[in-house]
Image (spheres, rainbow, N blue to C red):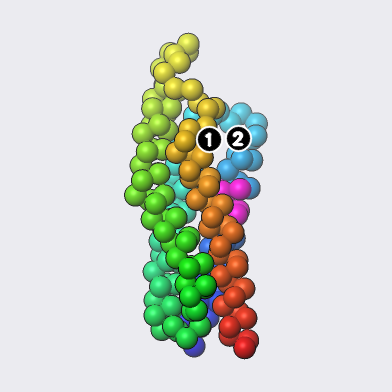
Amino acid sequence: MFALVLLTMLPFVWFGMITAISFIETPLKFKAPGMTHALGVGIGRLVFKALNMVEAAIVVFIVGAWTQRQDLVTLPIGILLAVPILALAMQTVIIRPAMAKRTKALSETALRPSGSTAVQPKVATATHLAYIGSEALKVVTLPIAGILIVLAVAA
């Protein structure tokens, strides 16, 4: 029964976390009075590191529940669950480390005397766009997977 609860609940919890942090908090943070770009990026690094750790825990619980209730996870649901899991793996192994190099350089630039232009702070890079795209993949697939799981339970 616990596996059933996890399998029906966690895709929606994960979806909510990504939506709240990636698509609401992050853009709004830079509009706060007195917020510098370097400070916002520094806060973002901490928040996204914590988010990714919680996401990894959610993945462990989803996979564990999936193994216990394989009857509910049809091929389409499995694919819809695999996409965000793979997106998170890609973010953790490839995208975030590449972004960390740039954000570290931005933080160091903020500490230099004014006039330094070593980092263009407001230019989106390919890795940044890849991160946004992978977040969008998760936001699209997770609720669909969750709905299909709930429908499978109700059937």
Q: Main secondary structure of the magenta part?
A: helix
Left or right: 116, with 133 as reference point: left
Residue 125 placed where, x, y %?
Answer: 48, 33
Badge 2 density bin: few <14, some 14–19, many ≥20, Cα 10 Å: some
Label tally: 2
The residue at which mark 2 appears reads as 30
* Residue 126 lies in the magenta-colored region: no
Say which amino acid is labelled 2: Phe
* Residue 19 lies in the magenta-colored region: yes
User: 49 above or below 1?
Assistant: above
- SS for callout 1: helix
Task: Pick the residue in front: 8 or 70.
Answer: 70
User: 59 above or below 90?
Assistant: below
The residue at which mark 1 appears reads as 40
Mark 2 touches mark 1? (CB < 8 Å)? yes
Mark linked to residue 16? none
- Residue at left offset 60%, top offset 35%: 30
- SS for callout 2: loop
Residue 2 placed where, x, y %?
Answer: 48, 84
What is the span of residues highlighted in magenta in the rendered image?
A: 18-23
